[in-house]
């Protein structure tokens, strides 16, 4: 083998070669003492043979590989039992004949599936079940983004990439006044550009290392939904007119779901809805009825379920009153929103107990956590044994609330999916793909993602890519070796 000039090797590479050489020398003493265990079978007769390094002639023949010590478990059996059709006296089986081409072909690098190493595939859990993820980044994640308005094409690509990652329910926008929420002004333009929600979803990647379903995914969970936020009757009428225009032109229905919202805090309702809680609630029955007449299912949001940025802790009974009224109006699900991100395990547990005591159908209750104080994930995990079935999350933790200074975005979808899969629950989402989408979105927006799982997986990927480049003797543009070369 031709020698490599020392000047071309970095200090790290030289150290690794020296360590490998020393280990190889210690691995082959002067004699190979193969001693059968006391429980070895009767035909396990080993002969101590002086070790002789292979000559160049042997290397060119049919046995070009160095003999390697067998694993301990292998030595429990004789060579003739493990290889019954082979006859040999050495403890090592003979190397198979290699063609001249195969003898000099480099071995393929071993596969190192990152998601399997991180155990991000849902494993068998007797208490595990399918958990539905509602992705809110295109609406709740972008609506308060400062600076330049996100282009419609970027939003379209975001939704398509989320579908590619296995997300099936994506809140894509809202029919609000464009001068109040500029980031949502293009929702009527965005909806006709999206893949039809009635089309089959993109197929999963068969080579993915993060998709191993041990829990059946309900057929209904594989249907695509594009909910849009509708604050009032005017917003609903705008949506219905858009639907009619699309159907008249042969484009079909654009969505089958809307969302309405009510605050559980009076001061927040005045600031956000410009109306009292009772006024907002009284306006919803005709809106919900009209939506259902046009085959739109309705989801309800309750904000400030833990605390209010203006009045402090929210009365639990009042929170449950609002949620109960939304369900009685015909909402198929109610999402309980911790707007300030101050919720913890105790606070969420108290709310859940009151809802159960009041007789609410807990299968119709979702959790919507902001992660201001980093307790959103433990709070969500604590609700799983209590029957939580739906979680709202935002890619890379995007989002916020203009009326709650310091409040961060929703809990990152990547972190939720990772934690659920680790705990043995199923989401149907490909975590590897999801992380790719999150990194792409943050790069396009020029923001730092809040997902710790996203950063961790991306960092490991970059490290492995760097190792592979070093193994091939390559170097990325602008990358220096340890000794500055």
Image (spheres, rainbow, N blue to C red):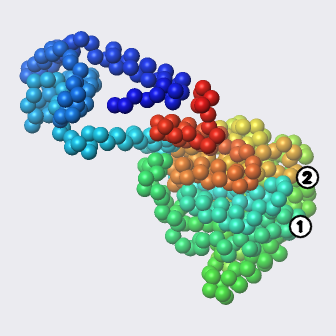
Q: Which mark is residue 152?
A: none
Marks 2 and 1, how far apart in space?
23 Å
Q: Is residue 418 above or below residue 78?
A: below
Q: Secondary structure at mark 2?
A: helix
Number of residues whose C-alpha sits closer than 10 Å to that of mark 1, classed few (under 14), some (14–19) or many (20 or more)? few
Where's residue 420, x and y in %? Answer: 56, 44
- Which one is closest to the eye, mark 2 or mark 1? 1
Quadrant where the C terminus lies?
A: top right
The image quadrant that residue 241 belongs to is bottom right
Frontmost residue, 192 versus 439: 439
Where's residue 117, x and y in %? Answer: 47, 37
Residue at image coords 40%, 40%: 109
Q: Read off the residue under disc 1.
A: 179
Quadrant where the N terminus lies?
A: top left
Residue at image coords 67%, 88%: 248
Number of residues whose C-alpha sits closer than 10 Å to that of mark 2, classed few (under 14), some (14–19) or many (20 or more)? some
Q: Read off the residue under disc 2.
A: 267
> From the viewer's perspective, is 484 left or right of 115?
right
Q: Secondary structure at mark 1?
A: loop
Q: Is residue 240 visible?
A: yes
How many discs mark residues in the rendered view?
Answer: 2
Residue that protrudes farthest toward the bottom in the picture: 248
Where's residue 381, x and y in %? Answer: 61, 41
Q: Is residue 261 visible?
A: no
Residue at image coords 43%, 56%: 206
Residue that protrudes farthest toward the top in the picture: 30
> From the viewer's perspective, is 475 left or right of 22?
right
Frontmost residue, 442 versus 225: 442
> From the viewer's perspective, is 472 left or right of 29?
right
Where's residue 388, x and y in %? Answer: 61, 49
Residue at image coords 67%, 43%: 451
């Amino acid at each position: 083998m031709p020698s490599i000039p020392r000047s071309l090797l970095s200090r790290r590479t030289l150290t690794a070669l020296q360590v490998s050489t020393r280990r190889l020398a210690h691995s082959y003493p002067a004699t190979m003492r193969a001693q059968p265990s006391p429980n070895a079978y009767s035909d396990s007769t080993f002969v101590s043979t002086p070790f002789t390094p292979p000559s160049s002639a042997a290397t060119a023949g049919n046995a070009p590989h160095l003999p390697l010590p067998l694993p301990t478990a292998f030595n429990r059996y004789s060579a003739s039992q493990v290889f019954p059709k082979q006859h040999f006296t050495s403890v090592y089986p003979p190397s198979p004949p290699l063609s001249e081409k195969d003898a000099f072909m480099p071995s393929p690098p071993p596969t190192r599936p990152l998601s399997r190493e991180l155990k991000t595939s849902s494993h068998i859990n007797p208490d595990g079940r399918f958990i539905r993820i509602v992705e809110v980044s295109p609406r709740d994640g972008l609506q308060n983004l400062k600076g330049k308005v996100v282009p419609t094409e970027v939003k379209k690509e975001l939704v398509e990439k989320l579908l590619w990652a296995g997300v099936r329910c994506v809140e894509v926008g809202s029919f609000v006044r464009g001068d109040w929420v500029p980031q949502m002004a293009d929702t009527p333009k965005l909806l006709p550009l999206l893949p039809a929600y009635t089309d089959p979803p993109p197929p999963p990647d068969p080579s993915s290392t993060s998709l191993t379903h041990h829990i059946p995914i309900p057929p209904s969970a594989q249907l695509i939904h594009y909910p849009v936020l509708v604050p009032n009757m005017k917003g609903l009428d705008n949506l219905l007119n858009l639907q009619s225009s699309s159907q008249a032109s042969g484009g079909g229905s654009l969505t089958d779901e809307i969302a309405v919202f009510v605050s559980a805090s009076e001061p927040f309702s005045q600031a956000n809805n410009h109306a009292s809680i009772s006024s907002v609630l009284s306006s919803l029955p005709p809106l919900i009825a009209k939506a259902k007449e046009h085959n739109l299912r309705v989801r309800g949001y309750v904000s400030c379920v833990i605390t209010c940025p203006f009045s402090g802790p929210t009365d639990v009974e009042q929170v449950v009153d609002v949620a109960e009224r939304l369900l009685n109006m015909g909402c198929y699900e109610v999402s309980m929103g911790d707007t300030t991100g101050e919720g913890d395990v105790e606070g969420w547990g108290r709310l859940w107990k009151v809802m159960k005591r009041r007789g609410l159908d807990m299968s119709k209750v979702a959790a919507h956590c902001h992660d201001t104080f980093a307790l959103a994930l433990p709070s969500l995990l604590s609700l799983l044994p209590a029957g939580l079935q739906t979680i709202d999350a935002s890619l890379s933790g995007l989002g916020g609330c203009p009326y709650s200074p310091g409040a961060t975005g929703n809990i990152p979808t990547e972190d939720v999916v990772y934690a659920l899969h680790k705990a043995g629950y199923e989401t149907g989402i490909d975590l590897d793909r999801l992380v790719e989408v999150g990194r792409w979105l943050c790069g396009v927006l020029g923001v730092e993602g809040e997902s710790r799982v996203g950063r961790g997986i991306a960092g490991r990927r970059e490290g492995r890519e760097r190792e592979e480049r070093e193994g091939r003797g390559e170097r990325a543009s602008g990358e220096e070796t340890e000794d500055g070369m």
